[in-house]
Each structure stands twice: as structure tokens, then as C-alpha cells.
Image: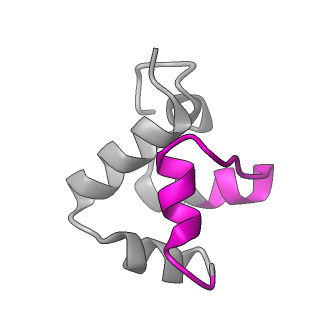
Amino acid sequence: MATLGSRLKELREKAGITQRELSEFMAYKTTRSIQRIEADESTIDHTQLIKLADYFNVSADYLLGRSDKER
């Protein structure tokens, strides 16, 4: 089953953006936050989830691994 971390990494790499670029978009101070999310060592709140879903144009369920349909 896909996890938030694996989906986020997949989408980020598919979009051709770095962890630093995504960190800046999410207004994180360092890339470590993205690294921890992608490694499933950290979670995000619902506002961050919505922001990522909108950014990658996918559903929150897809990001969370609850669906294999991006939309």
C-alpha cells in the first residue's frame, strides 16, 4: 500500500522539483521536513495536505494512499 511519503516523493520527482523547491513552496525552514515526510517519519496537518494536493493536482485520498486514482 502506498504511503503519503512514497506518493509525495513520486509526485515531486515526476514534477521535476527538488526537496528544497517543495520546502520553499510549503514555507518550511529546511528541506529536512520534506525528507522526513517522504521517509514516513513525520506527518502533516490537513491544511498542508490540501496545499500539496492542490499543488500536484491530485486528491487528498491519492496522497494518503487511500486511492490509486489521482483525481
Q: Where's residue 33, x and y in %?
A: 59, 66
Q: Nearer the viewer, residue 9 or 66?
A: 9
The quarter in which the C terminus is drawn is top left
Residue 44 vertical placement versus 1 (above, below): below
Q: Nearer the viewer, residue 64 or 37?
A: 37
Q: Residue at x 50, y 19 (%)?
A: 67
Q: Where's residue 8, x and y in %?
A: 44, 47
**Horizontal relation, residue 43 to residue 59: left or right:** right
Q: Where's residue 19, x and y in %?
A: 38, 69
Q: Which residues are magenta?
A: 29-51
Residue 51 vertical placement versus 4 (above, below): below
Q: Where's residue 20, x and y in %?
A: 40, 79
**Horizontal relation, residue 35 to residue 46: left or right:** left
**Horizontal relation, residue 16 to residue 19: left or right:** left
Asked if the stretch drawn in magenta spans residue 69, the answer is no
Q: Nearer the viewer, residue 12 or 50?
A: 12
- Picture quadrant of residue 70: top left
Q: Residue at x 44, y 51 (%)?
A: 57
Residue 4 vertical placement versus 56 (above, below): above
